[in-house]
Image: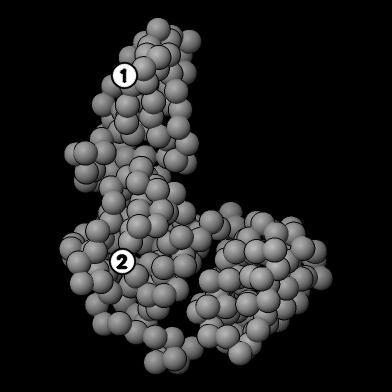
């Protein structure tokens, strides 16, 4: 019933675009919604169109459907989303993560904080909410992102660097550990408690709880490698990265209708 209602909201052009976009996210992994999503990807409004393309990631498409999608590529942002949809393993040429100034220049451009919020929580995006909680949403596996006056209390530069190089500066309260078992297996994650049964529990980089019996642990070592994966930026288009930054740490609030596509 919920899925049917989401379809109805998403397809109703009289609804506000951001409301339709939020409803579209709820159709992810819903095979019967593929036709709806393909139609929504041809919507005249960029907000609805782009959200449909993002939500189609991971959906098996026919050659004919792919060809139809290619015909809607009229803006750089849409072309990049299509590329991510049709060729998910392809990584476009970008600066090295060490080149922070180049990245800041690259990310300087119009951004939509509301779209960034959807990317942050989207199951087909970088999956930030799998480990981070903000405004009461998400999972509190990694540091909670507490905003003051609508933004995180860190500079844009530090925020971008934290995403590009997650292991450079790790929150002391979330230092990862590496467990080596007696049979030679290793696992890295955030150590969060010892169960009453004697098992050690960690959260891994996918937010999954892994349990290890004390008797099976050969070593438990501190790690300098964040469980936030390197290369997270490869799960986003450049515009999605801009939008996420605008959501987390906006400078000048902008709306899509304020800038030309």
Q: Position of residue 183 (x, y in %)?
A: 48, 10
SS of the residue under disc 1: strand
Q: Earlier in the sequence, mark 1 or mark 2?
A: 1
Snapshot colouring: one colour
Residue at x 60% of width, y 58% of height:
88
> Does residue 11 appear left or right of residue 251 in this picture?
right
Question: How many circles with numbers are drawn on the protein?
Answer: 2
What secondary structure is found at the residue carrying circle 2?
Answer: helix
Q: CA distance from mark 1 to mark 2?
A: 34 Å
- Could you say where residue 139 lies in the image, as x and y percent from the top left? 40, 48
Q: Which mark is residue 149?
A: none
> Which circle marks residue 220 in the picture?
1
Residue 93 visible within the image: no
The part of the image, by quadrant, that contains residue 39 is bottom right
| Disc assigned to residue 248 | 2
What's the residue at 24%, 77% (across, down)? Answer: 251
């Amino acid at each position: 019933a919920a899925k049917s209602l989401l379809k109805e909201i998403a397809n109703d052009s009289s609804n506000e675009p951001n409301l339709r976009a939020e409803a579209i996210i709820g159709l992810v992994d819903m095979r019967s919604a593929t036709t709806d999503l393909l139609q929504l990807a041809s919507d005249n409004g960029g907000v609805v169109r782009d959200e449909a393309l993002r939500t189609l990631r991971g959906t098996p498409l026919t050659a004919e459907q792919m060809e139809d999608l290619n015909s809607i590529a009229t803006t750089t942002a849409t072309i990049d989303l299509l590329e991510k949809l049709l060729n998910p393993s392809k990584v476009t040429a970008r600066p090295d993560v060490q080149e922070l100034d180049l990245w800041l220049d690259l990310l300087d451009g119009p951004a939509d904080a509301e779209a960034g919020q959807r990317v942050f929580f989207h199951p087909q995006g970088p999956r930030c909410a799998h480990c981070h909680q903000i405004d009461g949403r998400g999972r509190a596996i990694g540091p909670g992102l507490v905003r003051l006056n609508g933004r995180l209390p860190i500079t844009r530069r530090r925020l971008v660097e934290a995403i590009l190089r997650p292991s450079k500066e790790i929150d002391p309260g979330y230092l990862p550990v590496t467990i080596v078992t007696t049979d030679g297996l290793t696992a890295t994650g955030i150590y969060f408690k010892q169960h009453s049964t004697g098992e050690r529990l960690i959260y891994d980089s996918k937010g999954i709880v892994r349990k290890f019996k004390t008797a099976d642990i050969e070593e438990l070592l501190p790690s300098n490698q964040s469980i936030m994966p390197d290369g997270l930026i490869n799960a986003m288009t450049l515009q999605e990265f801009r939008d996420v930054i605008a959501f987390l740490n906006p400078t000048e609030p902008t709306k899509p209708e304020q800038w030309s596509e």
